[in-house]
Amino acid sequence: MCPTHAFPRLPRGEPCRFLPLSLLAACGFALAVAMAPPPLHAAEASRPNVVVILCDDLGYGDLGCYGHPHIQTPHLDTLARDGIRLTDCYAVAPVCSSSRAGLLTGRNPNRSGIYDWLPAGIPVWLKTDEPTIPGRLQGAGYQTAMVGKWHLNGQFNQATQPQPGDYGFDHWMATQNNAIPSHRHPKNFVRNGQPVGEIERFSCQAVADEAIGWMNQAASQAAPFYLHVCFHEPHEPVASPDALVDRYRDVAENEDEAQYFANVTNMDAAVGRIVTAIEAAGVREETLIVFTSDNGPETLKRYRGARRSYGSPGPLRGMKLHIYEGGIRVPGIVAWPGQIAGGEEVDEPVSGVDLLPTLCHLAGCEVPANKPLDGASLVPLLQGEPLARQRPLFWWYYRALTPPRFALREGPWKVVARWDGPLMTESAASIGRNINPQAIEILKTAQLVDFQLYHLEQDIGETTDLAARHPDVLARLRESARALHAEVQAEAPRWPATQAFWESGKR
């Protein structure tokens, strides 16, 4: 549990009481707020090492310092105490591949054609002409590595599609999607193109082992490093150490819930090992650590095998695959002892798309100018200046489980909209079953309709539609939403519609 003087626990179902602090942050990254004087000026500071830790399907309410009544996360609670706990931290999308693409590129994933999660074999991938964090930092002299879940191509470790090393990672050990057969003894990791074989560890601990080994070598070099750590936990199929499961059998409703609680605690222990290794390497004060999740928690029993999905969205509406807050608002913790004073909360809305422009700023490399970015550099906030976004934060997921497909946030206001296209289902016979030519044609032509308006500072659960009470706010945000939707719709690529192309993903 986080110390009560620093982080009051957030009861489920009740609105958060946010502190009005300034922030340098990104959900997937965030730089921060309460700085010890004098303010940092990027040109005067040494370029930091950066460690981004991304969980899979971790809910907004799943950590002790975000109010979970049972799950023990002492290492993350300590990291939050030593740094910043973000209350309004957002994933780029409510689904995994899309969110990961947006975090790495600073762009809404629909711009690059990552419209949904990528099943194994699908002939869709993140194109290599997209700007990426590792590519920009590698070009600026950083050492770079990625460990864990990749999920940005369908044909993993095959010559038919780009692999992690093609985006700027010097070193990588990854899986295409989930740990197989589960988190216990995974056997589908590949290291720099070579299969690793079965690992007699739980997935998060195997990821931590590889991350620590690489980091120890990188920390001994003069060049700074960027380490991208992507845990599989707590995504299904969930498996957890027996000793940790034992902790929760008295408080969990059943064995499956105890397994989930233990899964989060096991991931927390892996984070603790990484932080300890950074300290032991003597680079803690030079290292920015960012912790977050790729989207909200999975719905229990939504699909076969999701029997241990007991994640919590806390007081938020919706879950994974929803455009409502529960699908996109996620935990966010940032720590940088050399620059950030600890024990603070911040309520500035931030997103994973902010990570690329911010890290480019800190690394002293140019932000790519050949493609529109949707994030903002947050470094000005470190200089005592307000954050000025060129465009508001927005989300668009064509296969959301509830009718709204598009959302936009500006200050405390959030607008969500349906569209005039059909609702996509997960039925095997549906054109909306993942990415395909028919679904792409619909999302390229559908228009936004039926707008709802929420004031998130007063209504974190999105229970009261204020559209009729604030027509001026609605009109302004509706215009912004339609303009952004049209812009992204125009850029969104049509993957080749030939049968041969799509059949290539079945071989």
Image: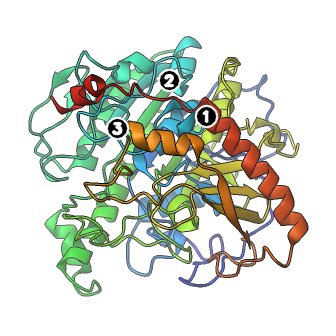
Do labels 2 and 3 touch, CB within 8 Å? Answer: no
Secondary-structure class at tag 3: loop
Residue drawn at (52%, 67%) of the image: 326
The amino acid type, in three-letter code, at marker 3 is His
Relative placement, left or right, of 188 versus 350 is left
Please name which of the two marks, 2 or 3, marks the residue nearer to the observer. Answer: 3
**Can you tell which mark lies on residue 348?**
none
Please name which of the two marks, 1 or 2, marks the residue nearer to the observer. Answer: 1
Within 10 Å of disc 3 (Cα), the crowding (few <14, some 14-19, many 20+) is many
Name which of mark 1 and mark 3 comes first in the sequence.
1
Relative placement, left or right, of 253 versus 477 is left
The amino acid type, in three-letter code, at marker 2 is Pro
- Residue at label 1? 106
Name which of mark 1 and mark 2 comes first in the sequence.
1
In this rendering, the answer to whether 364 lies above or below 350 is above
- Residue at label 3? 151
- Residue at label 2? 134
